[in-house]
Image (cartoon, rainbow, N blue to C red):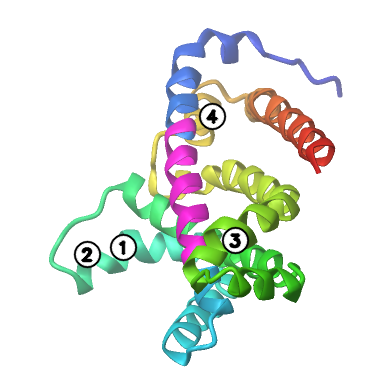
C-alpha cells in the first residue's frame, strides 16, 4: 500500500511551529544557564575536601543522575504544589527538572576537568601566595574549561533535545505544537519529520561553532 505524504498541512501551520520554536529556545536558554552554572557550584562541592560541601553535593548528583528527567518534571508539576503552598507553571516545572538533572551531569564534568589539572599548578599558585578561590578562578578553571569544552558542548546539545520532555506538562514548545498539528491533520509522520529537521537546523550550526572554538583554543595553547 502506497503512503500519501502530506507536508502541505504541516507548513500551513508554520505559525504554530514558530511559536513552539520560540518556546523551545526559551526553555533551552533557561536550562542551559541554570544547569551549567549550578553544575559548577555542585562540581566544586564534589571536589571539596570538607564533608559539609562534599556530602550534599554527592547526594544531589547521585539522586538526579539516577532518576528519570521525565519523572522529575512530573513530580515538580504535580507533587510540588501539594507539599509547597504555591502553584507552578509548566515552564517552571520543566525548567526545574531539566536544569537540576543537567546540573548533576555537568557537576561530574567540572569535577573531572578540575581533577585533570596537574598538582604542580596548585603548588605554583600556593607558592605565589594565592588562596584556594584565587587559584581556582585564575589558574585551574581557565585550563579545565578548555578540556571540558567538548563534554559541556554535548551537555548543551542534550539540554536542547531534552526540551521536548516539557510537552508532558503541556508547555508550548516544538513537540507540543507538533502533537497538536498531527492530531488535527492526521499526519504524524510528516509532522515529526519536520520537527526533527527543525532541531537539526538549530543544532548543526551550534555544533560546528564549537568545533571552530575548539580549534581556536588548541592553537592558542
Look at discs 2 and 3 and give the one toward the viewer: 3
Location of mark 3 (residue): 106
Residue pointed to by mark 1 = 78
Q: Mark 2 near mark 1, Cβ–Cβ under 8 Å?
A: yes
Q: Real-space Cα distance between discs 2 and 1? A: 6 Å
Q: Which residue is mark 2?
A: 81
Whether residue 101 is visible to the viewer of this picture, yes or no, is: no
Distance between the Cα atoms at labels 4 and 2? 28 Å
Q: CA distance from mark 3 to mark 1?
A: 26 Å
Segment tinted magenta in the rendering = 25-41
Magenta stretch, overall SS: helix
Labels 3, 1: front one: 3
Which residue corresponds to the image point at 46% horizontal and 38% vertical from the top-left? 29
Q: Which residue lies at the image location 61% right of the left edge and 45% below the top edge?
A: 156
Task: Name the image quarter holding residue 83.
Answer: bottom left
The image shows residue 42, relative to residue 87, as above or below, that is below
Which SS class for mark 2? Answer: helix
Q: Residue at x 53, y 81 (%)?
A: 48
* 3D distance between C-alphas at marks 4 and 3: 30 Å
Q: Which mark, by number, is residue 178? A: 4
Q: Horizontally, is 127 left or right of 217 in the view? A: left
Q: Nearer the viewer, residue 218 or 129?
A: 129
Give the mark nearer the N terminus: 4 vs 2.
2
Q: Are marks 4 and 3 in contact (CB under 8 Å)?
A: no
Residue count near mark 4 (Cα–Cα under 10 Å), binned few <14, some 14–19, many ≥20: many
State the separation of the CA atoms marked 2 and 3: 28 Å
Amino acid at each position: 500500500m502506497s503512503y500519501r505524504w502530506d507536508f502541505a498541512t504541516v507548513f500551513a501551520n508554520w505559525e504554530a511551529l514558530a511559536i513552539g520554536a520560540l518556546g523551545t529556545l526559551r526553555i533551552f536558554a533557561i536550562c542551559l544557564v541554570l544547569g551549567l552554572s549550578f553544575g559548577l557550584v555542585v562540581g566544586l562541592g564534589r571536589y571539596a575536601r570538607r564533608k559539609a560541601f562534599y556530602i550534599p553535593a554527592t547526594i544531589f548528583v547521585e539522586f538526579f543522575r539516577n532518576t528519570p528527567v521525565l519523572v522529575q518534571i512530573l513530580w515538580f508539576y504535580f507533587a510540588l504544589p501539594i507539599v509547597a503552598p504555591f502553584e507552578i507553571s509548566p515552564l517552571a516545572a520543566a525548567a526545574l527538572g531539566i536544569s537540576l538533572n543537567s546540573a548533576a551531569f555537568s557537576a561530574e564534568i567540572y569535577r573531572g576537568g578540575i581533577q585533570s589539572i596537574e598538582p604542580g599548578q596548585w603548588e605554583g599558585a600556593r607558592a605565589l601566595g594565592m588562596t584556594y578561590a584565587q587559584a581556582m578562578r585564575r589558574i585551574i578553571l581557565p585550563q579545565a574549561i578548555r578540556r571540558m569544552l567538548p563534554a559541556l558542548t554535548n551537555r548543551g546539545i542534550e539540554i536542547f533535545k531534552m526540551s521536548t520532555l516539557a510537552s508532558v506538562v503541556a508547555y508550548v514548545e516544538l513537540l507540543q505544537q507538533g502533537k497538536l498539528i498531527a492530531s488535527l491533520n492526521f499526519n504524524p509522520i510528516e509532522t515529526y519529520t519536520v520537527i526533527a529537521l527543525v532541531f537539526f537546523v538549530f543544532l548543526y550550526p551550534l555544533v560546528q561553532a564549537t568545533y571552530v572554538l575548539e580549534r581556536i583554543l588548541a592553537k592558542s595553547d
